[in-house]
Amino acid sequence: MTGAEWTIVALSLKVSIVAVLVTMPIAYGLAWLIARRRFPGRMLLDALVHLPLVLPPVVTGWLLLILLGRNGAIGKWLHDVLDITLVFNWTGAAVAAGVMALPLMVRAMRLSIEAVDRRLVGAARTLGASPFHAFLTITLPLSLPGIAAGAMLGFARSLGEFGATITFAANIAGETRTLPLAIYTGLQVPGSEGAVARLAVIAIVLSLGALLASEWLVRRSQGARAHVL
Amino acid sequence: MSYEIAPLETASFEIDLDMSVDDHTFALEFGSNAKLTALVGPSGVGKTSTLNAIAGLLRPRSGRIAVAGRVLFDSAAGVDQPPEQRRAGYVFQDARLFPHKRVAANLDYGEKLAPDSARFITRSEVVELLEIEHLLDRQPPTLSGGEARRVAIARALLSAPRFLLLDEPLASLDESRAETLLTLIERLRDELDLPMLLVSHSTAEVERLAGRVVAMAPPGRS
Protein backbone atom coordinates (compact mmCIF):
# COMPACT_ATOMS: atom_id res chain seq x y z
CA MET A 1 0.00 0.00 0.00
CA THR A 2 1.11 3.55 -0.70
CA GLY A 3 1.37 6.20 2.00
CA ALA A 4 -1.89 7.81 0.91
CA GLU A 5 -3.66 4.46 1.03
CA TRP A 6 -2.28 3.78 4.50
CA THR A 7 -3.63 7.14 5.70
CA ILE A 8 -7.08 6.21 4.40
CA VAL A 9 -7.05 2.69 5.89
CA ALA A 10 -5.66 3.89 9.23
CA LEU A 11 -8.31 6.63 9.42
CA SER A 12 -11.06 4.15 8.53
CA LEU A 13 -9.90 1.71 11.22
CA LYS A 14 -9.57 4.50 13.81
CA VAL A 15 -13.04 5.87 13.05
CA SER A 16 -14.65 2.41 13.08
CA ILE A 17 -12.92 1.15 16.22
CA VAL A 18 -13.66 4.33 18.21
CA ALA A 19 -17.26 4.32 16.93
CA VAL A 20 -17.79 0.71 18.05
CA LEU A 21 -16.06 1.12 21.43
CA VAL A 22 -18.09 4.23 22.32
CA THR A 23 -21.36 2.82 21.00
CA MET A 24 -20.96 -0.61 22.66
CA PRO A 25 -21.97 0.31 26.25
CA ILE A 26 -24.81 2.53 24.97
CA ALA A 27 -26.06 -0.24 22.70
CA TYR A 28 -25.86 -2.81 25.50
CA GLY A 29 -27.78 -0.57 27.89
CA LEU A 30 -30.51 -0.01 25.29
CA ALA A 31 -30.58 -3.73 24.43
CA TRP A 32 -30.97 -4.62 28.10
CA LEU A 33 -33.76 -2.07 28.61
CA ILE A 34 -35.69 -3.32 25.58
CA ALA A 35 -35.11 -7.00 26.38
CA ARG A 36 -35.71 -7.00 30.12
CA ARG A 37 -37.80 -4.00 31.17
CA ARG A 38 -41.44 -3.23 30.55
CA PHE A 39 -42.04 0.52 30.67
CA PRO A 40 -44.23 3.01 28.84
CA GLY A 41 -42.44 4.22 25.74
CA ARG A 42 -40.53 0.97 25.27
CA MET A 43 -41.93 0.51 21.76
CA LEU A 44 -41.05 4.11 20.93
CA LEU A 45 -37.49 3.61 22.20
CA ASP A 46 -37.20 0.43 20.13
CA ALA A 47 -38.41 2.33 17.05
CA LEU A 48 -36.01 5.24 17.67
CA VAL A 49 -33.08 2.83 18.00
CA HIS A 50 -34.00 1.28 14.67
CA LEU A 51 -34.47 4.62 12.90
CA PRO A 52 -30.91 4.81 11.46
CA LEU A 53 -31.49 1.38 9.92
CA VAL A 54 -34.56 2.43 7.96
CA LEU A 55 -33.88 6.13 7.23
CA PRO A 56 -31.83 7.14 4.19
CA PRO A 57 -28.32 7.60 5.68
CA VAL A 58 -28.19 11.13 4.23
CA VAL A 59 -31.21 12.01 6.36
CA THR A 60 -29.51 10.61 9.45
CA GLY A 61 -26.46 12.72 8.59
CA TRP A 62 -28.62 15.79 8.16
CA LEU A 63 -30.32 15.17 11.53
CA LEU A 64 -26.89 14.86 13.14
CA LEU A 65 -25.91 18.16 11.53
CA ILE A 66 -28.99 19.84 12.98
CA LEU A 67 -28.39 18.40 16.44
CA LEU A 68 -24.60 18.34 16.68
CA GLY A 69 -23.48 20.92 14.10
CA ARG A 70 -21.73 24.04 15.33
CA ASN A 71 -25.06 25.87 15.46
CA GLY A 72 -27.02 22.75 16.37
CA ALA A 73 -29.04 22.31 19.55
CA ILE A 74 -26.39 20.19 21.28
CA GLY A 75 -23.43 21.08 19.04
CA LYS A 76 -23.48 24.76 20.01
CA TRP A 77 -23.31 23.86 23.69
CA LEU A 78 -20.50 21.32 23.08
CA HIS A 79 -18.57 23.97 21.15
CA ASP A 80 -19.14 26.92 23.51
CA VAL A 81 -18.88 25.12 26.86
CA LEU A 82 -16.63 22.12 26.24
CA ASP A 83 -14.78 23.41 23.16
CA ILE A 84 -15.66 20.22 21.27
CA THR A 85 -16.39 20.40 17.56
CA LEU A 86 -17.75 17.27 15.94
CA VAL A 87 -18.30 18.41 12.37
CA PHE A 88 -15.59 18.29 9.71
CA ASN A 89 -13.16 16.13 11.70
CA TRP A 90 -12.61 12.45 12.42
CA THR A 91 -14.65 12.45 15.64
CA GLY A 92 -17.64 13.54 13.55
CA ALA A 93 -17.04 10.61 11.22
CA ALA A 94 -16.93 8.34 14.27
CA VAL A 95 -20.22 9.78 15.59
CA ALA A 96 -21.90 9.21 12.22
CA ALA A 97 -20.55 5.65 12.02
CA GLY A 98 -21.56 4.91 15.62
CA VAL A 99 -25.13 6.12 15.10
CA MET A 100 -25.46 4.07 11.92
CA ALA A 101 -24.04 0.97 13.65
CA LEU A 102 -26.25 1.32 16.76
CA PRO A 103 -29.35 -0.56 15.51
CA LEU A 104 -27.35 -3.57 14.34
CA MET A 105 -25.44 -3.71 17.63
CA VAL A 106 -28.60 -3.39 19.73
CA ARG A 107 -30.29 -6.19 17.75
CA ALA A 108 -27.43 -8.64 18.23
CA MET A 109 -27.04 -7.82 21.93
CA ARG A 110 -30.77 -7.91 22.60
CA LEU A 111 -31.06 -11.41 21.14
CA SER A 112 -28.26 -12.68 23.34
CA ILE A 113 -29.71 -11.03 26.48
CA GLU A 114 -33.12 -12.56 25.75
CA ALA A 115 -31.43 -15.95 25.40
CA VAL A 116 -30.10 -15.77 28.98
CA ASP A 117 -32.42 -17.82 31.19
CA ARG A 118 -33.98 -15.34 33.62
CA ARG A 119 -34.44 -18.10 36.15
CA LEU A 120 -30.66 -18.17 36.54
CA VAL A 121 -30.86 -14.55 37.68
CA GLY A 122 -33.54 -15.61 40.18
CA ALA A 123 -31.25 -18.38 41.45
CA ALA A 124 -28.45 -15.84 41.90
CA ARG A 125 -30.78 -13.57 43.88
CA THR A 126 -31.74 -16.38 46.30
CA LEU A 127 -28.00 -16.97 46.83
CA GLY A 128 -27.66 -13.40 48.07
CA ALA A 129 -26.91 -11.40 44.91
CA SER A 130 -28.30 -7.89 44.48
CA PRO A 131 -29.91 -7.20 41.09
CA PHE A 132 -26.73 -5.42 39.94
CA HIS A 133 -24.41 -8.19 41.16
CA ALA A 134 -26.61 -10.78 39.44
CA PHE A 135 -26.43 -8.73 36.24
CA LEU A 136 -22.62 -8.50 36.39
CA THR A 137 -22.06 -12.18 37.19
CA ILE A 138 -24.87 -13.89 35.23
CA THR A 139 -26.52 -11.81 32.49
CA LEU A 140 -23.39 -9.99 31.29
CA PRO A 141 -21.05 -13.00 30.93
CA LEU A 142 -23.77 -15.19 29.42
CA SER A 143 -24.56 -12.54 26.80
CA LEU A 144 -20.89 -12.00 25.94
CA PRO A 145 -21.12 -13.85 22.57
CA GLY A 146 -23.87 -11.43 21.50
CA ILE A 147 -21.76 -8.46 22.62
CA ALA A 148 -18.86 -9.71 20.51
CA ALA A 149 -21.08 -10.44 17.51
CA GLY A 150 -22.73 -7.02 17.84
CA ALA A 151 -19.32 -5.34 17.98
CA MET A 152 -18.14 -7.10 14.83
CA LEU A 153 -21.36 -6.26 12.95
CA GLY A 154 -21.08 -2.66 14.13
CA PHE A 155 -17.47 -2.55 13.02
CA ALA A 156 -18.32 -3.81 9.53
CA ARG A 157 -21.17 -1.31 9.30
CA SER A 158 -18.93 1.56 10.44
CA LEU A 159 -16.26 0.62 7.94
CA GLY A 160 -18.75 0.94 5.10
CA GLU A 161 -20.51 4.09 6.31
CA PHE A 162 -20.89 6.67 3.58
CA GLY A 163 -24.10 8.72 3.47
CA ALA A 164 -24.30 9.97 7.05
CA THR A 165 -20.54 10.55 7.19
CA ILE A 166 -20.28 12.67 4.04
CA THR A 167 -23.35 14.67 5.09
CA PHE A 168 -22.33 15.27 8.70
CA ALA A 169 -18.52 15.15 8.73
CA ALA A 170 -17.88 16.07 5.07
CA ASN A 171 -15.17 14.61 2.80
CA ILE A 172 -11.84 16.05 3.95
CA ALA A 173 -8.65 14.20 3.00
CA GLY A 174 -6.83 12.89 6.08
CA GLU A 175 -9.66 14.02 8.38
CA THR A 176 -12.92 12.40 7.37
CA ARG A 177 -12.10 10.67 4.08
CA THR A 178 -12.59 7.03 5.04
CA LEU A 179 -12.39 4.15 2.54
CA PRO A 180 -15.86 4.52 0.99
CA LEU A 181 -15.43 8.30 0.70
CA ALA A 182 -11.97 7.86 -0.85
CA ILE A 183 -13.38 5.42 -3.42
CA TYR A 184 -16.20 7.84 -4.23
CA THR A 185 -13.70 10.69 -4.57
CA GLY A 186 -11.48 8.57 -6.82
CA LEU A 187 -14.40 7.84 -9.09
CA GLN A 188 -14.86 11.59 -9.68
CA VAL A 189 -11.28 11.94 -10.97
CA PRO A 190 -10.59 10.62 -14.52
CA GLY A 191 -7.65 8.23 -14.80
CA SER A 192 -7.71 6.97 -11.19
CA GLU A 193 -9.36 3.61 -11.98
CA GLY A 194 -6.33 1.71 -10.72
CA ALA A 195 -6.31 3.53 -7.37
CA VAL A 196 -10.05 2.95 -6.99
CA ALA A 197 -9.64 -0.76 -7.70
CA ARG A 198 -6.89 -1.07 -5.07
CA LEU A 199 -9.03 0.71 -2.45
CA ALA A 200 -12.00 -1.46 -3.36
CA VAL A 201 -9.94 -4.63 -2.84
CA ILE A 202 -8.80 -3.35 0.57
CA ALA A 203 -12.43 -2.61 1.48
CA ILE A 204 -13.51 -6.10 0.39
CA VAL A 205 -10.76 -7.76 2.44
CA LEU A 206 -11.53 -5.72 5.60
CA SER A 207 -15.31 -6.19 5.33
CA LEU A 208 -15.06 -9.88 4.58
CA GLY A 209 -12.76 -10.32 7.58
CA ALA A 210 -15.21 -8.55 9.88
CA LEU A 211 -18.17 -10.50 8.47
CA LEU A 212 -16.43 -13.86 8.89
CA ALA A 213 -15.41 -12.95 12.42
CA SER A 214 -19.00 -11.98 13.33
CA GLU A 215 -20.37 -15.15 11.71
CA TRP A 216 -17.96 -17.21 13.77
CA LEU A 217 -18.96 -15.37 16.96
CA VAL A 218 -22.68 -15.83 16.26
CA ARG A 219 -22.11 -19.56 15.78
CA ARG A 220 -20.25 -19.69 19.07
CA SER A 221 -23.03 -17.76 20.83
CA GLN A 222 -25.61 -20.24 19.53
CA GLY A 223 -23.46 -23.00 20.98
CA ALA A 224 -23.43 -21.23 24.33
CA ARG A 225 -27.20 -20.83 24.16
CA ALA A 226 -27.62 -24.57 23.73
CA HIS A 227 -25.71 -24.95 26.97
CA VAL A 228 -27.95 -22.55 28.84
CA LEU A 229 -31.13 -24.41 27.92
CA MET B 1 -48.76 -39.98 61.84
CA SER B 2 -46.26 -39.70 64.66
CA TYR B 3 -42.70 -38.51 64.57
CA GLU B 4 -39.79 -38.66 66.92
CA ILE B 5 -38.36 -35.34 65.78
CA ALA B 6 -39.19 -32.64 68.26
CA PRO B 7 -41.12 -29.74 66.78
CA LEU B 8 -39.48 -26.31 66.70
CA GLU B 9 -40.29 -23.78 69.35
CA THR B 10 -41.31 -21.09 66.92
CA ALA B 11 -43.42 -21.83 63.91
CA SER B 12 -41.21 -22.77 60.96
CA PHE B 13 -43.58 -21.61 58.27
CA GLU B 14 -46.58 -19.28 58.50
CA ILE B 15 -48.01 -18.93 55.04
CA ASP B 16 -51.09 -17.07 53.88
CA LEU B 17 -51.05 -16.43 50.17
CA ASP B 18 -53.32 -15.16 47.47
CA MET B 19 -51.47 -15.79 44.24
CA SER B 20 -52.05 -15.06 40.60
CA VAL B 21 -49.60 -16.68 38.19
CA ASP B 22 -50.20 -16.67 34.42
CA ASP B 23 -54.00 -16.40 34.72
CA HIS B 24 -54.03 -19.16 37.33
CA THR B 25 -55.12 -18.01 40.77
CA PHE B 26 -54.97 -19.89 44.02
CA ALA B 27 -54.94 -19.27 47.73
CA LEU B 28 -53.03 -21.19 50.35
CA GLU B 29 -52.95 -20.88 54.11
CA PHE B 30 -51.06 -23.02 56.56
CA GLY B 31 -48.87 -22.86 59.61
CA SER B 32 -46.33 -25.46 60.57
CA ASN B 33 -43.92 -25.96 63.43
CA ALA B 34 -42.39 -29.11 62.01
CA LYS B 35 -38.73 -29.03 61.06
CA LEU B 36 -39.59 -30.43 57.68
CA THR B 37 -42.91 -29.53 56.11
CA ALA B 38 -44.08 -31.17 52.89
CA LEU B 39 -46.26 -29.54 50.28
CA VAL B 40 -48.11 -32.09 48.18
CA GLY B 41 -50.70 -31.90 45.43
CA PRO B 42 -51.26 -32.56 41.74
CA SER B 43 -49.05 -30.78 39.23
CA GLY B 44 -50.16 -27.30 38.23
CA VAL B 45 -51.76 -26.64 41.59
CA GLY B 46 -49.16 -24.03 42.52
CA LYS B 47 -46.58 -25.84 44.64
CA THR B 48 -43.55 -24.39 42.86
CA SER B 49 -45.19 -20.96 42.70
CA THR B 50 -45.57 -21.13 46.48
CA LEU B 51 -41.84 -21.85 46.86
CA ASN B 52 -41.08 -18.97 44.48
CA ALA B 53 -43.26 -16.65 46.55
CA ILE B 54 -41.50 -17.67 49.77
CA ALA B 55 -38.07 -17.18 48.15
CA GLY B 56 -39.14 -13.74 46.89
CA LEU B 57 -39.06 -14.58 43.18
CA LEU B 58 -42.82 -14.15 42.75
CA ARG B 59 -44.96 -11.51 44.38
CA PRO B 60 -48.32 -12.68 45.77
CA ARG B 61 -51.34 -10.46 45.20
CA SER B 62 -51.69 -10.29 48.95
CA GLY B 63 -50.92 -12.25 52.07
CA ARG B 64 -48.23 -12.86 54.63
CA ILE B 65 -45.12 -15.04 54.67
CA ALA B 66 -43.12 -15.63 57.82
CA VAL B 67 -40.35 -18.19 58.26
CA ALA B 68 -38.92 -19.03 61.68
CA GLY B 69 -40.64 -15.98 63.11
CA ARG B 70 -39.21 -13.59 60.53
CA VAL B 71 -41.71 -11.76 58.34
CA LEU B 72 -40.57 -11.86 54.71
CA PHE B 73 -43.73 -10.56 53.12
CA ASP B 74 -46.79 -8.87 54.52
CA SER B 75 -48.97 -6.98 52.09
CA ALA B 76 -50.98 -5.35 54.89
CA ALA B 77 -47.85 -4.05 56.63
CA GLY B 78 -46.08 -3.20 53.36
CA VAL B 79 -43.25 -5.68 53.92
CA ASP B 80 -41.69 -7.25 50.84
CA GLN B 81 -38.08 -8.28 51.29
CA PRO B 82 -36.03 -8.83 48.12
CA PRO B 83 -34.78 -12.41 47.60
CA GLU B 84 -31.23 -11.58 48.66
CA GLN B 85 -32.45 -10.50 52.09
CA ARG B 86 -34.75 -13.48 52.59
CA ARG B 87 -31.83 -15.88 52.28
CA ALA B 88 -33.71 -18.94 51.14
CA GLY B 89 -31.62 -21.98 50.37
CA TYR B 90 -33.62 -22.82 47.29
CA VAL B 91 -32.88 -26.13 45.57
CA PHE B 92 -34.67 -25.88 42.24
CA GLN B 93 -36.06 -28.96 40.57
CA ASP B 94 -33.82 -28.34 37.54
CA ALA B 95 -30.85 -27.53 39.86
CA ARG B 96 -30.37 -24.28 37.95
CA LEU B 97 -26.59 -24.29 38.19
CA PHE B 98 -24.81 -21.44 36.42
CA PRO B 99 -23.77 -23.00 33.11
CA HIS B 100 -20.75 -20.73 32.58
CA LYS B 101 -19.15 -21.51 35.93
CA ARG B 102 -17.48 -24.71 37.04
CA VAL B 103 -19.02 -26.62 39.95
CA ALA B 104 -16.47 -25.09 42.35
CA ALA B 105 -17.37 -21.57 41.17
CA ASN B 106 -21.06 -22.36 41.55
CA LEU B 107 -20.35 -23.24 45.20
CA ASP B 108 -18.30 -20.04 45.62
CA TYR B 109 -21.15 -17.89 44.36
CA GLY B 110 -23.40 -17.96 47.40
CA GLU B 111 -20.58 -18.63 49.84
CA LYS B 112 -18.85 -15.34 48.99
CA LEU B 113 -22.10 -13.40 49.43
CA ALA B 114 -23.01 -14.99 52.76
CA PRO B 115 -22.39 -12.97 55.93
CA ASP B 116 -19.67 -14.64 58.03
CA SER B 117 -21.82 -14.68 61.14
CA ALA B 118 -24.54 -16.68 59.38
CA ARG B 119 -22.35 -19.60 58.30
CA PHE B 120 -23.15 -22.94 59.91
CA ILE B 121 -21.25 -25.37 57.73
CA THR B 122 -17.82 -25.29 56.09
CA ARG B 123 -16.96 -25.87 52.48
CA SER B 124 -15.17 -29.15 53.22
CA GLU B 125 -18.07 -30.42 55.32
CA VAL B 126 -20.52 -29.69 52.51
CA VAL B 127 -18.30 -31.29 49.88
CA GLU B 128 -17.91 -34.40 52.02
CA LEU B 129 -21.58 -34.59 53.02
CA LEU B 130 -22.79 -34.45 49.43
CA GLU B 131 -19.89 -36.47 48.00
CA ILE B 132 -19.08 -33.98 45.25
CA GLU B 133 -15.30 -33.72 45.64
CA HIS B 134 -14.74 -35.39 42.25
CA LEU B 135 -17.19 -33.00 40.54
CA LEU B 136 -15.60 -29.69 41.55
CA ASP B 137 -13.75 -29.13 38.25
CA ARG B 138 -16.65 -30.17 36.04
CA GLN B 139 -18.86 -27.88 33.94
CA PRO B 140 -22.54 -28.07 35.02
CA PRO B 141 -23.89 -29.13 31.58
CA THR B 142 -21.83 -32.33 31.85
CA LEU B 143 -23.38 -33.43 35.17
CA SER B 144 -26.08 -36.09 35.51
CA GLY B 145 -29.41 -35.15 37.12
CA GLY B 146 -28.47 -36.59 40.50
CA GLU B 147 -25.02 -34.97 40.47
CA ALA B 148 -26.48 -31.58 39.54
CA ARG B 149 -29.01 -31.80 42.35
CA ARG B 150 -26.32 -32.65 44.90
CA VAL B 151 -24.27 -29.67 43.73
CA ALA B 152 -27.38 -27.48 43.93
CA ILE B 153 -27.98 -28.57 47.54
CA ALA B 154 -24.32 -27.87 48.35
CA ARG B 155 -24.52 -24.44 46.72
CA ALA B 156 -27.65 -23.62 48.72
CA LEU B 157 -26.14 -24.76 52.04
CA LEU B 158 -22.96 -22.73 51.49
CA SER B 159 -24.97 -19.55 50.99
CA ALA B 160 -25.77 -19.76 54.73
CA PRO B 161 -29.54 -19.87 54.22
CA ARG B 162 -32.03 -19.33 57.02
CA PHE B 163 -34.33 -22.02 55.63
CA LEU B 164 -34.37 -24.58 52.83
CA LEU B 165 -36.82 -24.92 49.96
CA LEU B 166 -36.58 -28.23 48.11
CA ASP B 167 -38.56 -28.61 44.89
CA GLU B 168 -39.12 -32.29 44.04
CA PRO B 169 -35.62 -33.23 45.18
CA LEU B 170 -36.00 -36.88 44.20
CA ALA B 171 -37.83 -36.47 40.88
CA SER B 172 -36.37 -38.28 37.86
CA LEU B 173 -33.68 -40.09 39.87
CA ASP B 174 -33.31 -43.86 39.76
CA GLU B 175 -34.18 -45.77 42.92
CA SER B 176 -30.72 -46.12 44.44
CA ARG B 177 -29.81 -42.47 43.84
CA ALA B 178 -33.16 -41.36 45.19
CA GLU B 179 -32.53 -43.45 48.31
CA THR B 180 -29.08 -41.87 48.79
CA LEU B 181 -30.51 -38.38 48.48
CA LEU B 182 -33.44 -39.23 50.76
CA THR B 183 -31.01 -40.36 53.46
CA LEU B 184 -29.07 -37.16 52.94
CA ILE B 185 -32.15 -34.97 53.34
CA GLU B 186 -32.93 -36.85 56.57
CA ARG B 187 -29.46 -36.04 57.80
CA LEU B 188 -29.84 -32.38 56.91
CA ARG B 189 -33.18 -32.33 58.73
CA ASP B 190 -31.73 -33.93 61.85
CA GLU B 191 -28.32 -32.27 61.99
CA LEU B 192 -29.05 -28.71 60.88
CA ASP B 193 -31.21 -26.20 62.62
CA LEU B 194 -33.01 -25.14 59.45
CA PRO B 195 -36.73 -25.09 58.71
CA MET B 196 -37.27 -27.04 55.51
CA LEU B 197 -40.14 -26.95 53.04
CA LEU B 198 -40.26 -29.75 50.52
CA VAL B 199 -42.47 -30.08 47.46
CA SER B 200 -43.25 -33.63 46.46
CA HIS B 201 -45.74 -35.90 44.80
CA SER B 202 -44.34 -39.09 46.31
CA THR B 203 -46.25 -40.20 49.41
CA ALA B 204 -43.47 -42.61 50.45
CA GLU B 205 -40.96 -39.76 50.41
CA VAL B 206 -43.28 -37.49 52.35
CA GLU B 207 -44.23 -40.03 55.01
CA ARG B 208 -40.60 -40.72 55.73
CA LEU B 209 -39.41 -37.11 55.85
CA ALA B 210 -42.10 -34.70 56.85
CA GLY B 211 -43.35 -33.73 60.27
CA ARG B 212 -46.25 -31.94 58.69
CA VAL B 213 -47.94 -32.47 55.33
CA VAL B 214 -49.85 -29.69 53.61
CA ALA B 215 -52.07 -30.87 50.76
CA MET B 216 -52.84 -28.41 48.00
CA ALA B 217 -55.96 -29.03 45.96
CA PRO B 218 -57.18 -27.33 42.82
CA PRO B 219 -59.83 -24.69 43.55
CA GLY B 220 -63.41 -25.92 43.20
CA ARG B 221 -62.53 -29.46 44.17
CA SER B 222 -61.84 -30.66 47.69
Image (tube, coloured by chain):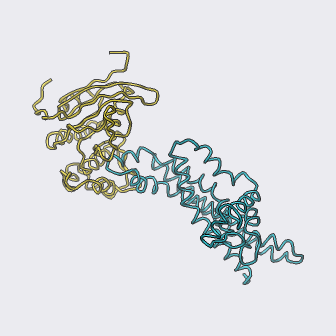
Chain colours: A cyan, B yellow
Q: For this rendering, which residue is in front, A203 or A125?
A: A125
From what the image shows, is residue B63 above or below residue B194?
Answer: above
Instruction: Answer whether residue B99 is visible to the viewer in this image.
Output: no
Identify the image quadrant of residue B69. top left
Residue A20 located left or right of residue A191? left
Instruction: Answer whether residue B1 is visible to the viewer in this image.
Output: yes
| Residue farthest along the front direction in this orientation | A80
From what the image shows, is residue A23 above or below residue B3?
Answer: below
Q: For this rendering, which residue is in front, B118 or B169?
A: B118
Q: Quadrant of the N terminus of chain A?
A: bottom right
Q: For this rendering, which residue is in front, A202 or A74?
A: A74
Identify the image quadrant of residue B102. bottom left
From what the image shows, is residue B158 above or below residue B4?
Answer: below
Residue A117 located left or right of residue A129? right
Residue A64: percent from the left, percent from the top?
A: 70, 61
Residue A226: percent from the left, percent from the top?
A: 49, 49
Residue A96: percent from the left, percent from the top?
A: 68, 64
| Residue farthest along the bottom direction in this orientation | A3
Residue A222 located left or right of residue A186? left
| Number of marks | 0
At 34% from the left edge and 35% from the top edge, which residue is drawn? Answer: B53
Residue B179: percent from the left, percent from the top?
A: 23, 37
Residue A190 located left or right of residue B82? right
Q: For this rendering, which residue is in front, B184 or A127?
A: A127
From what the image shows, is residue A182 above or below residue A164?
Answer: below
| Residue farthest along the right direction in this orientation | A190
